[in-house]
Amino acid sequence: MSTTVLATEALNIGYAPRHGQRRVVANDLNLTLHAGEVVCLLGPNGVGKSTLLRTLVGMQPPLGGRVLLDGADIAALSPREIARRLSVVLTERVEVGQLTAYALVALGRHPHTDWTGRLTPHDEDVVRRALEAVDAVNLAARLVYELSDGERQRVMVARALAQEPLVMALDEPTAFLDLPRRVEMMRLLRRLAREMNRAILLSTHDLDLALRTADTLWLLAPGGVMHVGAPEDLVLNGAFEATFASEGMTFDRREGHFRIHPPAYRRVALEGNGIVRAWTVRALERAGCLVVGGDESAPLRVVIGGDDRRPCWDVHANGAEPQRAGSLREVAALVQQSQAHR
Ligand SMILES: Nc1ncnc2c1ncn2[C@@H]1O[C@H](COP(=O)(O)OP(=O)(O)OP(=O)(O)O)[C@@H](O)[C@H]1O
């Protein structure tokens, strides 16, 4: 197993205001993060992901236990000592005034420069390599406030990289990004972990991307219960499904994604296979149906015909003459009509 760069010992997290009630979010967390590893911290809203992340990076004191950064208790390290080992990328937009992307990334060298803050040729080299690593050399001279969300996020990751940390912690780095940019960001983080041997910890609500990208999931369930494991193990043992269990939604273990079930569903037997079947299931579920196999009995039967490029559907309702549909919009309309006439 590779080097442990961050660990917790019997860590309790939460809030202990001077006036008011103590609020425990999770207790007795014993977690480890290794060099070269991508860990995704997942959990439903309000379960405590940000609280844990803030405690791990030393921005919030623990209620009990310790966080060890590179073997040292983070509570005993100075901010500069922490910054040499750990960098943080937060979701909130930081006010950067008139800084260029280059100047912002160069700020990442601060923990390594002398009191004048002057960059040595080595520091400049590190900044250039950080920009290269996130494919942002062409953004160097641009003002940060003019960048798109995706471009700014890459520059923020470059700033974190320029710190040359052992651990990079990112709070929802894919928030505000469109799907291609989210995939790109996750790929980038994965590559940085592998090629630069960084440990990367990120919190996210992107369940699908986390399942596909993370080496390890830290799954924080309601009540502060933490499940740790490879994504596939946590799907197979049911922890993933249980953590996100919600009325009207079930997790499809075979496909690895959640299905949304409208509350009032009607059974529809579906005959047919392949890609047309998959999209027909989606359309029928959206129309409020529970789709069962073609060999099961149901008041409605849909039979797929044609081929993948030009499919058609025969809708049989309660033994009446079948009606032919040339699109899934028509299938949904026929299903709804037959419901109205029930
Ligand atoms: N400053 C605070 N003082 C007291 N309780 C707080 C404070 N900040 C957050 N909490 C509570 O701690 C719990 C965990 O909050 P946290 O923000 O860590 O959850 P989260 O998993 O990051 O949520 P989300 O996914 O919605 O961002 C919540 O019940 C929240 O109300």
Image (tube, helix red, strand yellow):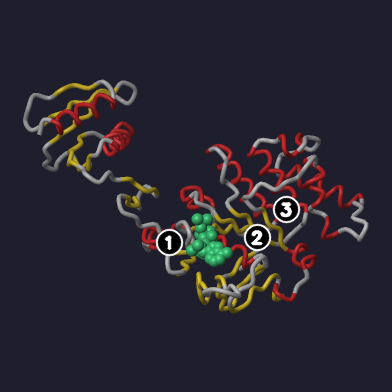
Rendered location of residue 186, percent (x, y): 58, 47
For residue 315, side relative to residue 32 (left or right): left
Where, by quadrant of the figure, is residue 321 drawn?
top left
Q: Amino acid at mark 2?
A: Ala
Task: Residue under label 2, please give it.
Answer: 199
At mark 2, the secondary structure is: strand
The answer to whether mark 3 is within 8 Å of ligand 1 is no
Q: Tell me how far mark 1 sits from mark 3, CA to CA.
A: 30 Å
Q: Tell me how far mark 3 sits from mark 2, CA to CA.
A: 12 Å
For residue 67, side relative to residue 298 (left or right): right
Question: Is 119 situated above or below 216?
Answer: above
Q: Nearer the viewer, mark 1 or mark 3?
A: 3
Q: Nearer the viewer, mark 3 or mark 2?
A: 3
Pointer 2 local density, CA inside 10 Å: few below 14, some 14–19, many at least 20: many
Q: Amino acid at mark 3?
A: Ala
For residue 258, side relative to residue 341 (left or right): right
The tag earlier along the polypeptide, 1 or 3, is 3
Where, by quadrant of the figure, is residue 312 drawn?
top left
Q: Tell me how far mark 2 sits from mark 1, CA to CA.
A: 21 Å
Kindly identify which numbered label has been placed on residue 234.
1
Task: Residue under label 3, please give it.
Answer: 160
Rendered location of residue 172, percent (x, y): 57, 51
The tag earlier along the polypeptide, 2 or 1, is 2
Q: Amino acid at mark 1?
A: Leu
The answer to whether mark 2 is within 8 Å of ligand 1 is no
Residue at the farthest left position = 319
Q: Is residue 63 visible?
A: yes
Rendered location of residue 26, percent (x, y): 50, 71
At mark 3, the secondary structure is: helix
Question: Is 271 situated above or below 221?
Answer: above
